[in-house]
Image (cartoon, rainbow, N blue to C red):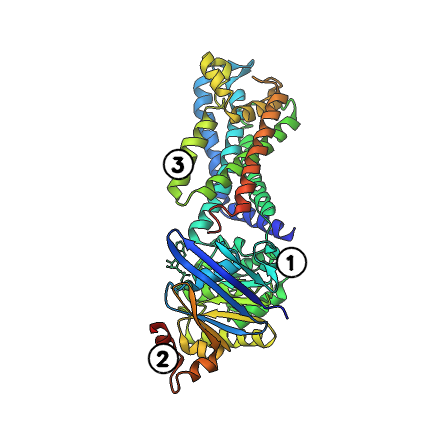
Amino acid sequence: MIGFWTLFYKELLRFWKVGFQTVGAPVLTALLYLLIFGHVLDEHVQVHGVRYTSFLIPGLVMMQVLQNAFANSSSSLIQAKITGSIVFVLLPPIPYGAFFAAYVLASVARGLMVGVGVLVATLWFADLQMAAPLWVLVFAVLGGAILGTLGMIAGLWSEKFDQLAAFQNFLIMPLTMLSGVFYSIHSLPAFWQRVSHYNPVFYMIDGFRYGFFGVSDVAPEVSLMVVVACFAAVSLLTLSLLKRGWKLRA
Amino acid sequence: MIAAVSIVDVVKHFGSLQALAGVSLEIAEGEFFGLLGPNGAGKTTLISTLAGLVRADSGWLSVLGHDVVKDYRQARSLLGVVPQEIVFDPFFSVRETLRIQSGYFGLRHNDDWIDEILENLDLAGKADVNMRRLSGGMKRRVLVAQALVHKPPVIVLDEPTAGVDVELRQGLWQFVRRLNNEGHTIILTTHYLEEAEALCGRIALMKQGRIIALDSTANLMAAHPGGTLEDVFVRTMNQ
Ligand SMILES: Nc1ncnc2c1ncn2[C@@H]1O[C@H](COP(=O)(O)OP(=O)(O)OP(=O)(O)O)[C@@H](O)[C@H]1O
Ligand SMILES: [Mg+2]
């Protein structure tokens, strides 16, 4: 257990020591999105009966939770692999389950910190109520855990920074951007609505947004099941990769 | 008695390259053992299979009776490895690095021992300096310190003195000798053969993934009267 806590604590310190970049910068990015899209569209658009700015904020919060959870585990692993400092965690007797939990929980922590930062910063722009705070928390934690786990897979798989960047740009970015952060999928043509239902990130955002407005595109219980199933799938995959020492132990 | 390290028929390929071609070796508790051989002989690969960084294609390895695959947690907690390459985590100071490494081995409140290691490796003055600000030789000392945080009964040093100044070299050997006298088993690789000659009780010479000579330092030297270990090394390699 001490091994797990130490690795978790080390992973927290790793991003906290450069918190300006790892927490501050994503909060600023989200604010810029809000200023631009909110300003342009607020007058004209209403979704689920709420003003566009209010609709947009939970999406932006969740998008930053997800992207930062992914960034945390993936960048930590690739840096350690490329610099060779990964040996410091491979030599000690840390069980692979503890290894997994430490990286994923640290990713969730960074995601939540950024999420809270975005939420607090956007309070000035819209007055937002949480209809069901527990759903907000559950989806933020599970979404962060899924992306943190995907970040581990990406970090294990990549041997160079540009491979990791490809994973991020061609998979994670499209999945999060096309998930309904900026729109309700009901505003999409029928074909793209159906496509969106195959994007797991759509359920994370939709369920998270339900926690704020009490309305969503899909019932939150359905979203929860999809999200739990996704987390189970990616974590089982990652645990089996770690057990084999895939791309870690030659 | 259980061997400190037992290696049986270990084979390892990297693609088509055979890095270990069936190595068997037993090292007793309390030995000061030298693993010598030219670049690419397979020394680091052998050490890495022992440490679990590399998985052998076949064969068995154990540390104090604990199989490095089946019983990896015990095996790893009994082993301290100083890697050949200088690596460090740029986020932390020397003391933070050593505290974190202690935690990985399940140890809290390890500061007394950490201070002792720092003192012996002449790092006490650098305890609160960030790793990035250390010179190359100092970074290597920290690597030695990291391998020792959990007082491992078996200590493996993969070229610990490459790029290290004379003073530290002597300090390091004094410290390692003391650990050996206290019962720790030491396994050393080095290209400085005088060091191996002075320190090691027994030596294995490796070439192309095989052990081609294995004997006490005295016996190896006796086979080539009047020579140094370097002469023995050169002749054995050319046989
Ligand atoms: N990860 C790896 N992938 C591919 N080949 C490798 C890898 N590690 C080692 N090798 C090869 O295995 C052989 C043995 O290398 P090893 O590092 O064990 O040698 P060594 O005896 O430690 O040499 P040196 O004295 O230079 O440190 C070399 O031919 C090396 O190129
Ligand atoms: Mg080597």
Q: Is residue B2 above or below residue A174?
A: below
Residue that label 2 marks: B231
> Quick one: which residue is furthest to the left in this view?
B238
For ligand 2, the image quadrant comes to bottom left
Q: Output the chain of dot 1.
A: B
Q: Output the chain of dot 3.
A: A
Front disc: 2 or 1: 2
Q: Going by the image, does B105 lie left or right of B218?
A: right
The spot of residue B47 in percent (x, y) is 48, 62
**Residue at 44% in and 77% down:** B195
Q: Output the chain of dot 2.
A: B
Amino acid at the residue labelled 2: Asp
Disc 2 and disc 1: Cα gap in Å? 48 Å
**Residue at 46% in and 38% down:** A25
| Residue in the foreground of this view, choosing between A212 and A161 | A161
The spot of residue A54 in percent (x, y) is 54, 21
Q: Secondary structure at mark 2?
A: helix
Residue that label 3 marks: A166
Disc 1 and disc 3: Cα gap in Å? 40 Å
Q: Going by the image, does B205 lie left or right of A46?
A: left
Tell me, yes or no, whether the two marked residues, 2 and 1, touch with CB atoms within 8 Å: no
Q: Going by the image, does B184 lie left or right of B208?
A: right
| Residue in the foreground of this view, choosing between A170 and B135 | A170
Tell me, yes or no, whether the two marked residues, 1 and 3, touch with CB atoms within 8 Å: no
Residue that label 1 marks: B108
- Asked if badges 2 and 1 are on one and the same chain, I answer yes
The spot of residue B95 in percent (x, y) is 55, 61
- Asked if badges 3 and 2 are on one and the same chain, I answer no
